Image (cartoon, grey):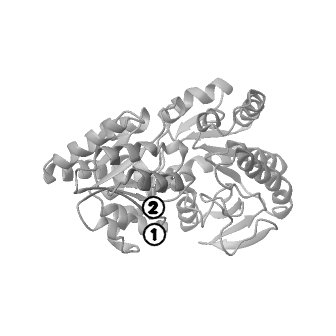
Amino acid sequence: MRILVVSQYFWPESFRINEVVASLVERGVDVDVLTGKPNYPDGDVFPGYRATGCVTESWSGARVFRVPLFPRGQKSGSRLFLNYLSFMASAAFFGAWRLRRVRPDAIFVYAPSPLLQALPALLLGWLKRAPVVVYVQDLWPESIEATGYVRNRLIIRMVETLVRVIYRHSDLIMISSRPFAAAIQRFSPTAEIIYYPNSVDASFCDPEAGLKPDVTDLDTGFPVVFAGNVGSAQAVHVIVEAADLLKDHAQIRLVVLGSGSELDWMRGEIEARRLPNLFLAGRFPVQAMPYLLARASALLVTLADQPIFAATVPNKIQAYMAVGRPIIAAMNGEGARLVQEAAAGLAVPAEDGQALADAILKLYSLPQAERDRMGANGKNYYRNHFDHEQLVSVLIGHLKRMTEANA
């Protein structure tokens, strides 16, 4: 079976699709990847790449076809719009040419924002007469409204029209969170929708096996670690507020592992508020994250107080469960529900700094045995619901079904 993966984001950017592609190749699937030039999350094209031109390379046994795009930059709605638009145009035009001799049995679209990256995949599906499976990680247009990057109602209505086209012409829609189904059915009542949760690489279950960087911010006290993109969607101001409220608790340390558009703002707040307990440790390769997360006393996930984010399950929840540390979920909806259902930690309302500070204090005051129990609960829940190898088998089954139906 030959699969064409279409994703604006791919290695060396840290996204779940990397592990999926590697595992598909290990299972004997021939995989081609159509993607852009890596520039997420900092907004600058990674060293060794140029924004212009097409590149073909190999990664973990998959052929990777890279097309030009406009780098996203930071805190710029216009640059982000050009970033999305440029990949759509490049993937449709250059992608169709570069892939002219490739005959996939099915096309698999990994679709965090922007969902519109599915449009060139639909074109390729039509040209190559291959079924298109769209794996929805983020709801559009709800997501662009919630982040505030687009406020123009005309543009939002245009996006709604394109989203309707995507959903109605996809052969199968897979969703990473169950609440996504209702929003998708609003655009396409007859679409076939299947719940398919995210997972993480198996290395998160064995933190000692990967890279082990020395991060001194994790060496002492009770480190509460936030990992991942530091952006507006994560409402990271709530971390700053909690740190301010916890300044007098010398043992509690809030450590941020990652980068993003709000990182400079956080750095300024640390200085302005004189926060001795909030540390920005920087971004690390994904191979180091299992080890770093396992060194935390607790792991923190935050999202903004928006309806769209209440329907979202950040992939870091699976990573946090896999490493077996108690979780504090400062968010509403499905992600918080999963943490509570697994008895893997504590959940508080989104963007409530006082509630977050109280939850950190509560977890800090618990006996170590109780915190260990929460971590073990999360690890067991991960094994039963989010195991990577099991989910790869499920994905291959869906792709084979689509291929056979198209034969």
Q: Is residue 28 above or below residue 174?
A: below
Which image quadrant is residue 158 in? Answer: top right
- Report the amino acid beneath label 1: Gln
At x 30% / y 64%, what residue is drawn? 295
Quadrant of the rendered structure where residue 46 is? Answer: bottom right
Q: Earlier in the sequence, mark 1 or mark 2?
A: 2
Position of residue 186 relative to residue 140, above or below, is above
Numbered label attached to residue 201: 2
Residue at 68% x, 49% y is 403
CA neighbours of label 1 inside 10 A, class few (<14), some (14 to 19), many (20+):
some
Residue beneath disc 1: 287
Residue toward you, 298 or 124: 298
Circle 2: element type? loop
x and y percentages locating residue 377 in the rendered image: 25, 48
Q: Secondary structure at mark 1?
A: helix
Along the line of sight, the residue nearer the viewer: 327 or 365: 365
Viewer-nearest of discs 1 and 2:
1
What residue appears at the point 55 percent right and 59 percent down from the top-left corner?
A: 20
Corner quadrant of residue 68? bottom right
**Residue 254 in the image, given as x and y percentages of width and height:** 34, 54
| Residue 203 image offset from top left, x and y in percent | 40, 66
Left or right position of 304 against 361: right
Quadrant housing the N terminus:
bottom right
Q: Which mark is residue 45?
A: none
User: Can residue 79 be seen from the camera position used here?
Assistant: yes
- Height in image: 389 above or below 170? below
Amino acid of disc 2: Asp
- Gap between marks 1 and 2 measured at Cα: 10 Å
Q: What is the x, y in percent for residue 22?
A: 55, 65
In the image shown, does 297 or 392 lie closer to the viewer? 297
Mark 2 surroundings: few (<14), some (14-19) or many (≥20) residues within 10 A? many
